[in-house]
Amino acid sequence: MAVNFVRPMIPKLATDPWAIQFDAQGHLKHLLTIEGLGPTWITRILDTAENFMSVSDREIKKVPLLRGRTVVNLFFESSTRTRTTFELAAKRLSADVLNINLSTSATTKGESLLDTLRNIEAMQADMFVVRHEQSGAAHFIARHVAPHVSVLNAGDGWHAHPTQALLDAFTIRRIKGDFAPLRIAIVGDVKHSRVARSQIHAFNSLNVGELRVIGPRTLIPNDIEPLGVRVFHDMRQGLKDVDVIIMLRLQRERMEGGLLPTEQEFYRLYGLTEEKLGWAKPDAIVMHPGPANRGVEIESRVADGPQSVILEQVSNGIGVRMAVMALCMSAES
C-alpha cells in the first residue's frame, strides 16, 4: 500500500513545550500527548488511518511498510486490549514485535529503567510503546532513548492516552462526519481519566461544536472549564441534544476514599441506561474506552445495543495505531 507522507506545517520548535514529539525537520517522531499536535497533524493521522482500514479486509492482512523494524511493547501496567491492538497494528505493518513481561523483568530485580532501555536498544529496537502508572513516564523515556528510536505513549498515569483519543475521533468522524455541528458529552470519572484529558484536547483541536463533561462534583476537576468544556452535574441536562456520549470507566485504583458514596448510587445518577440514553438525540452514538464496568457506568442493554459503537472503536484502534507507527517511523526513512 502506498501511503502519502506529505508533511504538515512544521511546529515552532523553539517555543512549543511539546516539541520533543517532532524531530529537527518537523517530522512526527514520538506520540506522547495530543497537546502540541494541532488540527493539521491530528487530521493527518486520521486520514492515514483511513488508508489502512482496508488492510483488515484482505486475505493476507499485511503491508510491508515497516518490514525489518522492531517494535517493543513496554507495559508496566496491564491492558490486554491496548497492548493487543498495538501488537496487531505493528504486525500488519510487517514489523517484528517484542512484548516485555515487566512483572518478571530486571526492573523488579533492582535494574534501573534506563538500564533496561539500553539493553533493549542493544537488540536493535526501533520503537517503544510505553504504558506506565506514572504521569510523564513516556516523556522521560523519549528524552533518553537513542536518536533513531520512536516512543508512543499507550497511557501514563492521569496524564494522557493519545491513541485512544485519536481512535475515538476517528470513530466519530466515520459515523458523524464533520465535527463542527456535534455536541459531545464525556461522562463519569473525568478527574482520574487520562483518556478524557486527551479527548478534550483532540476534540477542541478538531473544532467540535460543543464539548461537555458530566459527573459528580468530586469526579470533575475544578479547573477544567478553561480547557473548553461545559460542566454538568445533572445527567438529564448534560445529555440534552447530544450527538455522542462517551462513558468513562471508574478509576477505582486511582481514587482516594470519600469521592463516591457507593457504586450503586453512581449508577443511579450517572450510569447510562436506556432511559437516560433517550435524553440524547435519537441517533446519538455511545462510546466507551474500555474495559466497561457493566452495571456501574453503563447498562448491558446499552453497551450491546444498536447505538453502541464500542466494538467499532476496538477495530478502528488498529488502523489508527498503524497510522501513528507508520508516520513516526517514516521520519527515519
Image (tube, helix red, strand yellow):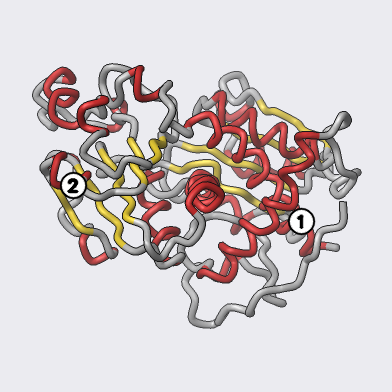
Q: Secondary structure at mark 1?
A: helix
Taking depth in this image into account, of 128 and 327 the one nearest to the observer is 327
Residue 153 lies, in percent from the top left, at 55, 47
Residue 133 lies, in percent from the top left, at 43, 36
Task: Please say if 188 is above or below 258.
Answer: below
Residue occupying the far front of the picture: 282
Taking depth in this image into account, of 194 and 244 the one nearest to the observer is 244
- At 49% from the left and 46% from the top, the residue drawn is 168
**Which residue is denoted by mark 1 in the rendering?**
329
- At 33% from the left and 51% from the top, the residue drawn is 184
Side (left or right) of 194 relative to 236: right
**Residue 292 sits in quarter:** top left
Q: Are marks 2 and 1 in contact (CB under 8 Å)?
A: no
For residue 169, the mark is: none
Q: Residues within 10 Å of mark 2 (few under 14, many from 20)?
A: many
Q: Secondary structure at mark 2?
A: helix
**Residue 4 sits in quarter:** bottom right
Q: Nearer the viewer, mark 2 or mark 1?
A: 2
Residue type highlighted by circle 1: Met
Residue 321 lies, in percent from the top left, at 65, 45
Task: Please say if 188 is above or below 41.
Answer: above
**Which residue is denoted by mark 2 in the rendering?**
238
Residue 80 lies, in percent from the top left, at 56, 23
Taking depth in this image into account, of 289 and 180 the one nearest to the observer is 180
- At 30% from the left and 45% from the top, the residue drawn is 186
Side (left or right) of 42 relative to 259: right
Q: Mark 2 vs mark 1: which is more N-terminal?
A: 2
Residue type highlighted by circle 2: Gly
